[in-house]
């Protein structure tokens, strides 16, 4: 609910830190709450911490759903 | 920005808006409460209300932790800084909240209090390490999203055996607040509002999971759709709520599946339960005392509890008599129903919780939407 | 060992610091002025060496032109930031304020308030940068002053500048001149200066390639005025503190009009957008130091825009909306998303949000 943005992990640093990239801006954050993340993963960043990982498949599914919902106004939903 | 821009696509927005308009029953009204301040802000900032049919009304709930932070707690923070000479670290949002004696953290700073804005709890810890001769207090506010980072710094402070660091814990809980809205005795005073469903908070849900909302759906027969943060997420969630209402369903649906699971973030939950426990009661600005709705620091970490360290007592401070925040937070009244709105009470001079943070219903309406209150005929030449 | 006659030990720029003597008005003051300020600014007016500078009357004045004067205080922190420093910022800021009147900037004055202990090396760096900016803009610093305050009473270095210029007869540019129907034009991408400065603040530390856009805009303004029929450029303003959002509201208020702008038309670098997202800031309220907003009569908009785009400081100039009649003086914005909202006055200082 609070301001949090999806950002890509570009580097991991011991013990629990990482550098993320959002649109070309880089920031150092903690990944203590998302153990097991890897470079290339997208995490949701809030107050300097990664609080969750973005599931790429689900994201794609959601986008596809938007497109479907937006495509045929008036059509009955499945 | 990946995972951001795609979820703000204007063309898709129009399509979904058309779909919502097509599916609402013309003989029905739909009132949905978006609990989370971030959603309130998104709805205002992107002008989503304009894209919805008139049958759908969005009610802004008390999901803004700055808004529901009682004056008495800010007084405590100011007291620690002014009277005890401690360095008080806080997130930016809290700086402007007006407290007693015409003070705010920002005004106390102007009076000489050492109050520092931090972006992260870890920054407060850093300040403590760099100033071993001073007491450093982190004024911790926020819902379940912000609590795990606070838990981590307390664990870290314990590991380092820091002698000069403590936390003034004002973390609050979402499900309790929602329950309180649905069944508090005071609702009778203000009148009930038929809330047909909830847009569930995005980031709180990443931490607590979608599980805790199943209770509302079952017991109160209200649908909950957990929505992502972006405007398309919110619109899709509204469409899903409309469908649930039309089909007579009351389920928990997860629109934010790309980040929210049923269990939530277990590492975060573990950290929180290690450090914190429930308070029996806690005052929410505008809502009064809400049972089991907030956290305090466990005895094991007592050394880092500012309330114990500074022997703080809580003194409740009432809001202005004519402030309608309580009713507005419950969705019973609108900002424009409040006599103080826009005149005495403005973002510059906020009288109550709803105007204080840019996500409060009154602030959002004032800053982004008040042009709808007046007849503005604008012709682009 | 032979000591040269009249030998004066030079200031230790590398390791020395400003001390109370430098502000006392005696020999130490004079040495500071000669070795740092006069050496850098070096122009015929400053060389007069008097309490005030004696300046020639510009030709426009003799033909019915009017004098323009503007002043500014510069307190930026940190003093040195990506893309600039307090020195060049001071020159650009005041040159721009004068230029926003449609005036040709002529001269600058500079008053320095230095904190005891301020490193001379930093002072030299600031002054040299200021002198370079002044030379590049063609606007000399003709008179100045230096004071020193005790340690703890000043944030290193504050600079106050005054600029004078002349506006030729027939040119009247002002915030109250916007008319319904005017095109609103912005000279380039917004939000860079504020983000560049914020990126240096401790506790907000983030890495970005964003540099401040600080620049002197008077030649851009001259090009715009040349390209437009007389009187067609109604308003010019540089959106500094408070950003584009505040500036548009100021103009709306002064001119008693409303505005309708399109979010999608506002030029912005993706990194600025990302940085603002990350910090919870609205780019509309972030300071710019090398951009301007103009309200231009609709028939002149195309030629003005073309002239801007042909100038190095206006390559990204864009039409962002129009002035409309509105007694409420709202600045309305069509969001990228499709809905409408108002762009209100900035409330307080833009503090990064968590929620």
Image (tube, rainbow, N blue to C red):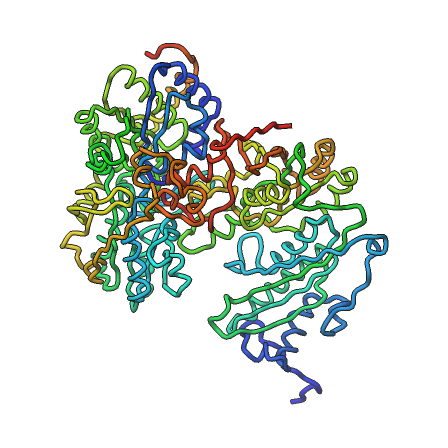
Q: Nearer the viewer, residue B331 or C153?
A: B331
Is C316 situated left or right of C151 in this image? right
Instruction: Residue at 57% x, 33% y: name it.
Output: C261
Q: Is residue A8 visible?
A: no
Q: Check the image and name the residue furthest to the right.
A: C63
Q: Check the image and name the residue furthest to the bottom.
A: C1
Picture quadrant of residue C45? bottom right
Q: Nearer the viewer, residue C95 or C175?
A: C175
Q: Is residue B269 above or below residue B259?
A: below
Picture quadrant of residue B185? top left
Where residue B243 appears, as percent x and y from the top left, is: 31, 17
Where residue B247 appears, as percent x and y from the top left, is: 27, 14
Q: Is residue C74 visible?
A: yes
Where residue C291 appears, as percent x and y from the top left, is: 62, 45
Q: Is residue C81 above or below residue C342?
A: below
Where residue B256 appears, as percent x and y from the top left, is: 32, 28
Number of numbered markers: 0
Is B39 situated left or right of C244 in this image? left
Q: Nearer the viewer, residue B260 or B240?
A: B240
């Amino acid at each position: 609910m609070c301001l949090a943005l999806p950002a890509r992990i570009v580097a991991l640093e011991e013990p629990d830190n990482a550098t993320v990239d959002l649109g070309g801006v880089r920031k150092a954050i903690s990944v203590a709450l998302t153990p097991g993340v890897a470079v290339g993963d997208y995490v949701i960043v809030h107050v300097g911490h990664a609080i969750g990982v973005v599931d790429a498949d689900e994201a794609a599914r959601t986008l596809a759903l938007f497109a479907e919902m937006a495509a045929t106004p008036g059509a009955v939903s499945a | 920005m990946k995972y951001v821009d795609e979820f703000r696509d204007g063309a898709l927005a129009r399509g979904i808006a058309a779909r919502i308009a097509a599916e609402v029953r013309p003989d029905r009204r739909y009132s949905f409460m978006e609990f989370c301040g971030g959603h309130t802000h998104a709805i205002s900032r992107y002008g989503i209300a304009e894209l919805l049919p008139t049958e759908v009304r969005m009610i802004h709930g008390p999901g803004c932790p700055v808004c529901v932070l009682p004056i008495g707690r800010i007084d405590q923070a100011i007291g620690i800084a002014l009277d005890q000479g401690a360095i008080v670290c806080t997130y930016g949002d809290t700086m402007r909240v007006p407290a007693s004696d015409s003070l705010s953290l920002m005004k106390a700073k102007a009076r000489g209090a050492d109050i520092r804005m931090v972006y992260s709890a870890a920054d407060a810890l850093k300040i403590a390490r760099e100033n071993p001769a001073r007491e450093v207090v982190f004024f911790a506010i926020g819902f379940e999203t912000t609590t795990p980072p606070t838990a981590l710094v307390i664990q870290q402070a314990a590991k380092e055996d820091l002698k000069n660091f403590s936390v003034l814990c004002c973390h609050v809980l979402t499900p309790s607040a929602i329950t309180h809205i649905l069944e508090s005795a005071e609702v009778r005073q203000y009148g009930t509002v038929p809330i047909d469903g909830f847009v569930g908070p995005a980031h709180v849900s990443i931490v607590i999971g979608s599980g805790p909302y199943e209770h509302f759906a079952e017991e109160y027969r209200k649908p909950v759709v957990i929505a992502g943060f972006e405007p398309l997420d919110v619109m899709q969630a509204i469409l899903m709520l409309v469908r649930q209402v039309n089909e007579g369903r009351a389920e928990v649906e997860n629109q934010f599946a790309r980040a929210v699971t049923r269990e939530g973030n277990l590492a975060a939950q573990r950290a929180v339960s290690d450090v914190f426990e429930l308070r029996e009661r806690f005052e929410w600005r505008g809502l009064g005392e809400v049972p089991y709705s907030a956290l305090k620091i466990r005895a094991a970490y007592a050394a880092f509890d500012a309330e114990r360290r500074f022997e703080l007592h809580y003194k409740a401070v009432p809001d202005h008599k004519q402030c309608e925040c309580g009713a507005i937070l419950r969705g019973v009244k609108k900002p424009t129903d409040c006599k103080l709105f826009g005149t005495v009470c403005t973002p510059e001079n906020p009288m109550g919780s709803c105007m204080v943070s840019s996500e409060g219903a009154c602030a959002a309406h004032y800053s982004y939407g008040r042009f709808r209150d007046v007849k503005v005929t604008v012709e682009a030449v | 060992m032979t000591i040269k006659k009249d030998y004066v030990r030079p200031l230790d720029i590398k390791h020395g610091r400003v001390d109370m003597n430098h502000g006392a008005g005696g020999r130490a003051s004079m040495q500071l002025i000669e070795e740092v300020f006069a050496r850098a600014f070096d122009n015929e007016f400053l060389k007069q060496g008097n309490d005030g500078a004696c300046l020639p009357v510009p030709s426009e004045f003799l033909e019915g032109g009017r004098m323009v004067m503007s002043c500014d205080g510069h307190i930026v922190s940190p003093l040195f930031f990506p893309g600039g420093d307090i020195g060049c910022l001071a020159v650009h800021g005041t040159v721009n304020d004068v230029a926003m009147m449609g005036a040709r900037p002529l001269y600058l004055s500079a008053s320095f308030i230095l904190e005891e202990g301020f490193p001379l090396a930093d002072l030299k760096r600031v002054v040299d940068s200021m002198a370079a900016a002044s030379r590049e803009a063609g606007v000399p610093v003709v008179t100045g002053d230096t004071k020193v305050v005790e340690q703890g009473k000043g944030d290193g270095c504050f600079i106050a500048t005054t600029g004078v210029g002349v506006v030729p007869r027939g040119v009247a540019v002002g915030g109250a001149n916007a008319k319904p129907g005017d095109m609103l034009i912005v000279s380039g991408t917004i939000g860079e200066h504020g983000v560049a400065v914020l990126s240096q603040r401790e506790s907000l530390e983030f890495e970005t390639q964003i540099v401040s856009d600080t620049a002197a805009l008077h030649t851009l303004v001259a090009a715009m005025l040349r390209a437009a029929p007389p009187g067609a450029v109604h308003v010019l303003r540089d959106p500094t503190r408070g950003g584009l959002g505040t500036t548009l509201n100021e103009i709306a208020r002064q001119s008693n009009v409303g505005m309708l702008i399109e979010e999608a038309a506002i030029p912005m670098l993706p990194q600025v957008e990302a940085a603002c997202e990350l910090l919870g800031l609205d780019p509309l309220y972030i300071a710019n130091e090398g951009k301007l907003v103009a309200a231009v009569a609709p028939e002149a908009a195309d030629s003005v825009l073309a002239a801007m785009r042909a100038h190095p400081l206006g390559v990204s100039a864009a039409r962002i909306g129009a002035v409309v009649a509105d007694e409420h003086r709202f600045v309305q914005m069509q969001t990228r998303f499709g809905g409408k909202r108002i762009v209100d006055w900035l409330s307080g200082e833009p503090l990064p949000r968590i929620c």
